[in-house]
Image (spheres, rainbow, N blue to C red):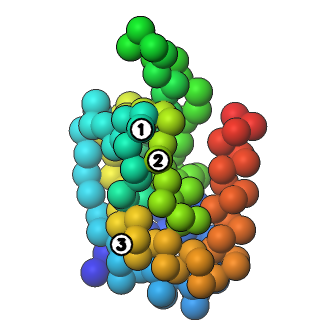
Amino acid sequence: MVPLQDLLRNALLGSLRMAIFEELSPELQTVSLPVGHVFNEPGEEVDQVIFPQSGMVSLLAVMLDGSAIETATVGREGVIGGMAGLGPHVTHIRSIVQTPLIASRVGAVPFRTLVLANSELRDLVVRHNEVLLAQ
């Protein structure tokens, strides 16, 4: 089990009511990932949801010629792949680690089960996605 103080480094996890957090926390694993690790490429179904505790992930739009441009960054304030909580989600972006990352990871399917059963968690996922779009 991941130590509570590590999980709460992520602002989204830290904002959850304890009852919701207790449902999610047994599903979380801590991972340490190097610069350059790619979570997803455009066209792939998201199979894991990542809550950074430290480090940074860049979200890149990939052009037809293979070049890419950063559209947003996510650190300990957010989540990568959170939209998979609303249903199977095929991403349109590349998610890549830009600074060494320590994060909590949960499979998309167990995360989706919790999100669909809990309106507070579902609202959090939607609001975070809106923040990414605004960024």
Residue that numbered label 1 is attached to: 43
In the rendered image of this protein, does residue 19 appear above or below residue 64?
below
Residue that numbered label 2 is attached to: 90
Q: Mark 3 or 1, which is nearer the eye?
A: 1
Cα separation, mark 2 vs mark 1, equals: 6 Å
**Residue 14: x percent and y percent?**
57, 70
**Residue 25: x percent and y percent?**
41, 80
Number of marks drawn: 3
Label 2 is placed on what type of residue? Val
In the image, what residue occupies the spot 69% across and 59% down? 126
Cα separation, mark 3 vs mark 2, equals: 22 Å
Q: Are marks 2 and 1 in contact (CB under 8 Å)?
A: yes
Counting residues from the start of the chain, the first of labels 3 and 2 encountered is: 3
Please identify the residue farthest to the bottom as the structure is shown. Answer: 19
Quadrant where the N terminus sits is bottom left
In the image, what residue occupies the spot 27% across and 57% down? 31
Does residue 5 show up? no
Element type at marker 1? loop
Residue that numbered label 3 is attached to: 28
Observer-nearest residue: 102 or 81?
A: 81
Counting residues from the start of the chain, the first of labels 3 and 1 encountered is: 3
**Residue 40: x percent and y percent?**
36, 41
